[in-house]
Amino acid sequence: GAVVSQHPSWVICKSGTSVKIECRSLDFQATTMFWYRQFPKQSLMLMATSNEGSKATYEQGVEKDKFLINHASLTLSTLTVTSAHPEDSSFYICSAASGSYEQYFGPGTRLTVT
Amino acid sequence: GQSLEQPSEVTAVEGAIVQINCTYQTSGFYGLSWYQQHDGGAPTFLSYNGLDGLEETGRFSSFLSRSDSYGYLLLQELQMKDSASYFCASTHPNQGGKLIFGQGTELSVKP
């Protein structure tokens, strides 16, 4: 149990375009979903926390207008990187929680902006 | 600020025991979690300490001392497949349940 999927697993886009990444909890209802960014050989940096039906809470320094988060249901959250630039290239990982301390992570999406 | 310090790299041989330390300075700290991440993969949950003391889960154990703001992950009977990055993370239920991760320790297990 506790499976989280992400789609796509990798994406290449041109500078200036927008990319949407989906995060789904497949076998449980997630009260909260989290979005992280990870550069090679570095730690996971929390970008935002989202709860179903409410606005996401962004961490300091994360541009909310650039990284749009929508949490439409208890099983789906989306992250849209708007007007992507090469510096946005990274590994984006979501996680889902259902009230306990444990978070279940998706397999990640590797974004490359050319 | 919020910070969790870990050694960046640890090397050990198969069958050995290794300890990965984590010292933290975080506000609103509730407990300490440990996650494993293989290269290019998703982090997977290993252990959680909500109270001081030792938690044992198979070959992995984790320890927490709140008075020392310190914890560690102990891996016994190391196997080649244990080569991965290990992250400690502080849990913050009063901040939406978010995790704040340490910088990670890359463990290399040699034959």
Image (cartoon, coloured by chain):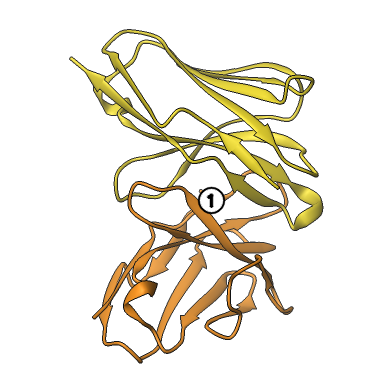
Using the rendered image of the protein, determine whether residue A101 is visible from the camera's viewpoint.
no
Q: Circle 1: is it few (<14), some (14-19), or many (20+) Cα within 10 Å? A: many
Using the rendered image of the protein, determine whether residue B53 is visible from the camera's viewpoint.
yes
Q: Which of A8 and A113 is in front in this view?
A: A113
Horizontal side, residue B23 vs residue B53: left or right: left
Q: Which residue lies furthest to the left in this view?
A: B111
Instruction: Give the structural element (helix, strand or loop) at label 1.
Output: strand
Look at 53% across and 51% down and name the residue there: A104
Q: What residue type is labelled 1?
A: Tyr
Position in image of residue B2 (x %, y %): 68, 45
Residue B21 vertical position relative to residue A33 in the rendered view, above or below: above
Q: Which residue lies furthest to the front in this view?
A: B1
Horizontal side, residue A32 vs residue B74: left or right: right
Position in image of residue A99 (x %, y %): 72, 52
Q: Mark 1 points at which residue?
A: A104
Look at 69% across and 43% down and name the residue there: B91
Look at 40% across and 48% down and name the residue there: A42
Residue B13 vertical position relative to residue A79 in the rendered view, above or below: above
Q: Tell which subunit mark 1 falls on.
A: A
Q: Hue of chain B?
A: yellow
Position in image of residue A23 (x %, y %): 48, 69
Which of the image's four quarters has the C terminus of chain B?
Answer: top left
Question: How many numbered discs sit on the rendered protein?
Answer: 1
Corner quadrant of residue B18: top left
Residue A89 vertical position relative to residue B105 in the rendered view, above or below: below
Q: Hue of chain A?
A: orange
Look at 74% across and 78% down and name the residue there: A54
